[in-house]
């Protein structure tokens, strides 16, 4: 099979022939119909994460937002069979640890991160192996296309987990989203689906246009204001946003997000840092203490939450397909990752030609 393999950090992924994977006794092999291209893939390609013991090893097949059909199943798999349409989370749990048993498989201590480690090669490939399929796989409704499921990928999953499960945004809340890439636009739709008033913040007018299309009530172009946090507080009134998300992961967006909050507001961190921050951002802790602000991290989504997310898609409350701006071939992936160096992509790009 063809696969896009990380060989050297920052160098174009190698399109190589690999042996088709075999299923584990409790796993399946999925023929990939679509796979999103995510900024987390860019972080992996750049070699980021060394500071958190999370650097992806050369030789790994990247890609962690797949959807497709089961083509082979291990003898212990009960819920899925050949031909089933499925979505695959990137946070793969072992299904037995205390976190998995509580429905929190995204933080399983013995799980795998699809496309980020040698034991879980990713889905920039014609086929991908999925362990512990009965726990990790999600049956894809016929009403949800493979392209839409790939767009759900880690960005919608992360946005949903962040705003519906980690924070539980409420109707009427003011929610600020700093950074309008894939996960930021997903967060706009998720927050809007929960009845929130959404303020989108970015430095690109093209991305702010996309945020408006996704349902943002107000936008802030950081190049047009002295201080984006003050601009958000002025729009939200009553001291600022109830919830604010950093969907980028750089110092400026993280601190602006914290500064956007009203008393007892909650900052949600989903963006990962770059080489400049190396996993560390200084925060105004005295200010956060005085105003009783909360700082919450969110990573992926438990596999058990897929049904709730699919219901939002089926009812039209969120529209992942609407964020897909480009469908590309596997051979185009190296160039599309390089375009992220300068935030040169808009919306969600999906591999559909393998």
Image (cartoon, grey):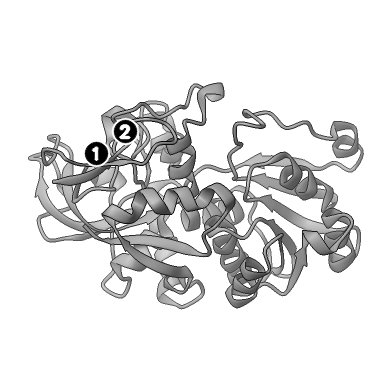
Location of the C terminus by quadrant is: bottom left
Label 1 with label 2: CB-CB less than 8 Å: yes
Q: Quadrant of residue 187?
A: bottom right
Dot label at residue 94 = 2
Q: Residue at x 28, y 50 (%)?
A: 137
Looking at the image, residue 3 sits to the left or right of residue 214; the answer is left
Find numbered disc 2 in the image and state the secondary structure of the residue it sits on. loop
Find residue 239 and report its horizontal and vertical position in percent. 91, 58
Question: Is 27 situated above or below 162?
Answer: above
As rendered, which of 334 and 310 lies closer to the eye? 334
Q: Residues within 10 Å of mark 2 (few under 14, many from 20)?
A: some
Q: Residue at x 54, y 62 (%)?
A: 186
Looking at the image, residue 46 sits to the left or right of residue 91; the answer is right
As rendered, which of 165 and 50 lies closer to the eye? 50
Res 2 seen here: yes
Residue that label 1 marks: 132
As rendered, which of 244 and 340 lies closer to the eye? 340
Find residue 28 and report its horizontal and vertical position in percent. 16, 44
Q: Residue at x 39, y 57 (%)?
A: 306
């Amino acid at each position: 099979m063809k696969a896009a393999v990380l060989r050297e950090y920052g160098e174009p992924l190698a399109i190589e022939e690999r042996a088709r994977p075999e299923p584990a006794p409790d796993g399946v092999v999925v023929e990939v119909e679509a796979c999103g291209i995510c900024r987390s893939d860019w972080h992996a390609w750049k070699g980021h994460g060394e500071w958190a013991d999370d650097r992806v090893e050369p030789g790994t097949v990247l890609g962690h937002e797949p959807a497709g059909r089961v083509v082979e199943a291990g003898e212990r798999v009960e819920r899925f069979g050949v031909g089933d349409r499925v979505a695959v989370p990137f946070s793969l749990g072992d299904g037995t640890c205390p976190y998995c048993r509580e429905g929190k498989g995204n933080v399983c201590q013995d799980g795998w991160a699809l496309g980020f480690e040698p034991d879980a090669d990713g889905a920039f490939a014609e086929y991908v192996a999925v362990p512990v399929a009965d726990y990790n796989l999600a049956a894809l409704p016929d009403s949800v296309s493979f392209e839409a499921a790939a767009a759900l990928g880690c960005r919608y999953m992360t946005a949903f987990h962040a705003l519906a499960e980690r924070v539980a945004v409420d109707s009427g809340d003011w929610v600020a989203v700093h950074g309008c890439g894939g996960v930021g636009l997903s967060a706009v739709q998720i927050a809007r689906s929960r009845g929130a008033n959404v303020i989108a913040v970015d430095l690109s007018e093209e991305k702010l246009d996309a945020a408006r299309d996704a349902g943002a009530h107000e936008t802030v172009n950081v190049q047009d204001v002295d201080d984006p946090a003050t601009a958000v507080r002025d729009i939200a009134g009553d001291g600022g946003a109830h919830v604010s998300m950093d969907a980028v992961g750089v110092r400026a967006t993280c601190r602006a997000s914290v500064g956007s909050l009203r008393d007892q507001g909650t900052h949600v961190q989903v963006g990962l840092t770059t080489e400049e921050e190396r996993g560390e951002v200084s925060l105004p802790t005295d200010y956060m203490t005085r105003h009783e602000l909360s700082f919450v991290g969110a990573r992926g989504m438990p596999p058990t939450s897929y049904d709730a997310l699919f219901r939002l898609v089926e009812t039209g409350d969120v529209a992942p397909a609407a964020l897909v701006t480009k469908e590309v071939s596997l051979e185009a992936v190296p160039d599309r990752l390089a375009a992220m160096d300068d935030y040169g992509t808009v919306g969600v790009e999906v591999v559909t030609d393998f």
